[in-house]
Image (cartoon, coloured by chain):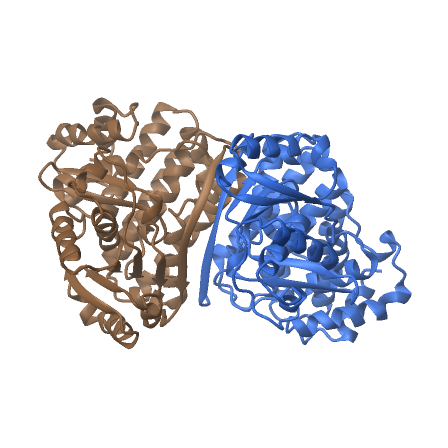
Chain colours: A brown, B blue
Amino acid sequence: MKSFVFYNPTKIVFGKDKTKSIGNYLHGKKCLLLYGKESIKKNGIYNSVVESLNKNGVMFVEKYGVKSNPILSFVHEAIELARKEKVDAVLAVGGGSVIDTAKAIACGFYYQGDVWDYFTDKAKIGDALPLYVVLTLAATASEMNNGAVITNEKTQQKFNIGAESLYPKISILDPVNTFTVPKTYTAYGCVDAMVHLLEGYFTQDEIDTSIQDGFVETMVKTLIESTGKIMNKADDFNARADFMWAATLALNGLTTAGTGNHGFPNHMIGHSLSALYDIPHGASLSIVFPAWLMYHAKEKSQNISQKIPKFGKAIFGVEDPQKTIESLKQFFNSIGAPTRLSQVDIPAADLDQIAGNAVMLANKWGLTEYTKGVITDILGLGT
Amino acid sequence: MKSFVFYNPTKIVFGKDKTKSIGNYLHGKKCLLLYGKESIKKNGIYNSVVESLNKNGVMFVEKYGVKSNPILSFVHEAIELARKEKVDAVLAVGGGSVIDTAKAIACGFYYQGDVWDYFTDKAKIGDALPLYVVLTLAATASEMNNGAVITNEKTQQKFNIGAESLYPKISILDPVNTFTVPKTYTAYGCVDAMVHLLEGYFTQDEIDTSIQDGFVETMVKTLIESTGKIMNKADDFNARADFMWAATLALNGLTTAGTGNHGFPNHMIGHSLSALYDIPHGASLSIVFPAWLMYHAKEKSQNISQKIPKFGKAIFGVEDPQKTIESLKQFFNSIGAPTRLSQVDIPAADLDQIAGNAVMLANKWGLTEYTKGVITDILGLGT
């Protein structure tokens, strides 16, 4: 095992009807209530939250309209509002996009320059407003980690931040809040969580990691099983609960503690697809990940290609790399997640432009082995 | 999945040579340096700690002599010293006994009455001194949870406390620090960690827990494999590291989050054996646990007896309950852990007295189905 620091102070409050308890945790505060679309008004989550805030005398000011692949200009507007209203907390009611936006607001609130400086490493994140979450979409694990990804729509860059002050204080995880998540977004959430687990599993430089491998394999199996059940019955509480907890644990630091250096090459390429074509994050990953695995199986890349049979055996009961990757693609397609660029109308002629964009992130993330040529080759296997 | 709150703010600093960093975290503090025997002077851990404290200008006063099954009178002495010296932190260098003692000191420091009131539920724990740990024995997980067990030697009661203020701030986990742990205590640590995992696994009232079951089975397998390697090579870094991390995760709240109510009946009976005969905690559990499993297999207890085949298949590749329990006993014996009371010279004639002591804890812990008769029957299967 490699050296590591594990620290995760987020308090998870998990279960049916827990949404109603959010006001207890915000007692005496004035918060920025942040959400995405009007859907939380239709499914009753908005009412539960507001009732709980009012019951506990929590003052709040609303800001809504966060979209998926959340954008910098919205963050700017929200920071301005938060300062004007002198809030002392941010309450995110939503999925990863809303939580990530909340994190950018929380740290940007105290920074005199442009918050984008944090994303380009021009400035280091210090204090942040305390962050509270009511999760409505299980996928990104942003509810239990200290990272956020925002797209600068002017520069077409989808970049990330991370800092100790950005762990949510409280995250309410009520599986019932996800009953109304449509099949497509359930599928994308499943892919996102699986790829979070598998980026580390395949790219880590430590080989002797029986605990971490067992955790990853356990959660990938759980995600596959629970997603299958949800596709048949959207309000299957146990399946939604398993899915939600697995997605949260998939990127909270647990499965990579002790595994050494690891990268997020699939997220890197996926972010470029989302930045250029605004396709959902999960859909970009279900295209890129099988292609990425196939590339490394062909290239016989050390560690990655050697681990494919272990993965195949644990998850699909097959050891052959081609069959393993085929099984994974079949699963993705079975839940409605695309596995080819053509399925989301991205022409093969654009590969060069996409690879050019992805290389910017490769440099930022230190994934220098991913040259424009390599990225083009990977994407070529997913056309 | 059942509702739960998961919160664990302890920062784990894991890896070779991390002991030398302890002073960085205690900057500006005056701490009570607490340890057990002189062994940490022989193996160099004491020197590393003191050097790091001095280098960082950390003042400290020493208190040593914590014994296994740590006792209340020692806690009283240490609280008096801590007050007299006006320390503002406790640094535990040791295993579960030292850390548990440190927790009792940390909360007792601020309490005007007898700290034992916390153990008998006469008073509720509030503030505590911040707690720092350098772990030297992997077993109890006290380094990453908020519980402690202390024996009142006057009343022969081994009772526990738990409170949010008792999570260690920092726990340094350096596998090298455990290279000199003798085989016997490595074996007892393995048993303790395994039974921590399995008490929840077998007694939880939720059945649909694929994530938690997978985590438990992963870590039980890792503990069996790594202990085997350590028995052959005491300084096998990877085996010591796997063992250490598994033991820490075995009782930090992760594997029981979402599993509903669960009990610690084996710890209850084991604590009585330790309180009455001062036998090591791990040795008491390796005797009690197989007997407890056998009792429930015979009684066909709901959930417990039904889960034995799942456990047997995952860990030993057998589904038959008798064979599963036999495999477990064989493993315990193979590492030198006893599985019968006679192996630790406790006569069968004492069963009545032991059961009488255990019933006190059964009442305190709400395990009312464990009457004196039931406990006697369980122990009878381990004579």
User: Residue B354: horizontal and vertical position, in percent?
Assistant: 81, 67
Residue pictured at 62% horizontal, 36% vertical: B240
Residue B257 visible in image: yes
Please count the marks in the image.
0
The location of residue B228, given as percent across then percent down, is: 69, 38
- Image coordinates of residue B126 in percent, x first then y, are 52, 64
Pick the residue in front: A244 or A71.
Answer: A71
Front-lying residue, B255 or A56: A56
Q: What residue appears at the point 20 percent right and 29 percent down from the top-left corner?
A: A360
B334 up-or-down from B373: above or below: above
In this rendering, would A10 be left or right of B293? Answer: left
Q: Quadrant of residue A227?
A: bottom left
Question: From the viewer's perspective, is B274 left or right of B194?
Answer: right
The residue sitting at the front extreme is: B84
Q: Quadrant of the C terminus of chain A?
A: top left
> In terms of image quadrants, where is residue B239?
top right
Q: Residue A313: where, in percent of width, then height?
A: 47, 41
A30 sits left or right of A7 in the view: left
Q: Is residue A66 visible?
A: no
Judging depth in this view, the residue of B362 and A309 nearest the camera is B362
Question: At x 61% / y 33%, what residue is drawn?
Answer: B50
